[in-house]
Image: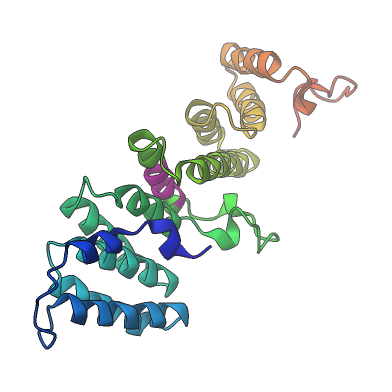
Amino acid sequence: MHHIGRIGSLLALAVLAACSNTPKDDPNSQASLDKLYAEAKDELSTGAYERAIKLLERIEGRAAGTLMAQQAMLEMAWAQHRSGEKAQALATLDRFLKLHPSSAGADYALYLKGLVNFNEDLGLFGRLANQDVSERDQQASRDALQSFRELIEKYPSSRYAADARTRIDFITNTLAQHEVHVARYYFVRGAYVAAASRAQTAVTEYQYAPAVEEALSIQAQSYDRLQLPQLRDDALRVLRKNFPQSKYLADGGRQDKPWWRLW
């Protein structure tokens, strides 16, 4: 997917609005800016992101207040993202959204903010499938979730909305899995209050995620170890209601422990 085609042609509007009688030797003339932008596109197409960024910075400065400057900022953020400069890309996008909140490219800026924080190598395409994303630090995923949610709330008809919704579902499931992973970690080590708390976070914040099934089981077991039978039974009741075929409810044949206990 080529990002320039997806962004939409802000630049085309800028060219149409340009004055045709500006001296060609003027570095701020449309002809000079067009030439500079063509050079930046060439650098982008070959993956020479650092050189492209420098050219786009010059365009933004020279074309300040124009649609071309907006386009340059979006291209710059993309190049920074592709070159691994996450902080710089986010700063560029935040600046864009602050300066141009009603821009035709605002939906793309929010989408790109989400992408910058969304680690695709460990995410939607599973290129590193042997790594458990639920065990990694989740702040970037939360930031991505916020950007994608803002996108679909403000621009539900955006061309990026459908993809953003897919990523929201994935991130939500991943964050729920993370909470369950931590809850399981605490439970095995006997920290039952902490285990119940993290499991409750998964149940409350990500109630439609598949990981909630195990979260409810961990809650029930933690409350049992804490000798809180009412809370235990409440968790089991919710588990039974929402997951009647749950594997965590299919332990009735064991004689050495309660039917719902797994550890």
By secondary structure, the bulk of the magenta-drawn segment is best described as helix
Name which residue lies at 22% across and 63% down. Answer: 16
Q: Along the line of sight, which residue is nearer the eye, 28 or 150?
A: 28
One can see residue 58 in this view: no
Name which residue lies at 33% across and 85% down. Answer: 51
- Farthest-out residue, bottom: 25
On-image quarter of the C terminus = top right
Is 144 in the magenta? Answer: yes
Compared with residue 119, is residue 164 higher up or lower down, i.e. above or below? above
25 sits to left or right of 213:
left
- Farthest-out residue, front: 21
x, y percentage for residue 11?
28, 64
Compared with residue 130, is residue 207 higher up or lower down, i.e. above or below? above
Name which residue lies at 41% across and 64% down. Answer: 4
Compared with residue 141, is residue 180 higher up or lower down, i.e. above or below? above
- What's the image's color scheme? rainbow
Q: Along the line of sight, which residue is nearer the eye, 46 or 260?
A: 46
x, y percentage for residue 7?
39, 57
Residue 27 is drawn in which quadrant?
bottom left
Compared with residue 189, is residue 64 higher up or lower down, i.e. above or below? below
151 sits to left or right of 242:
left
One can see residue 38 in this view: yes
Q: Which residues are magenta?
A: 141-148
x, y percentage for residue 91?
26, 62
> What is the tally of numbered marks visible in this picture?
0
196 sits to left or right of 4:
right
Is 70 in the magenta? Answer: no
Residue 156 is drawn in which quadrant?
top left
Name which residue lies at 54% across and 26% down. Answer: 207
x, y percentage for residue 69?
20, 66
Residue 30 is drawn in which quadrant?
bottom left
Q: Along the line of sight, which residue is nearer the eye, 9 or 53?
A: 9
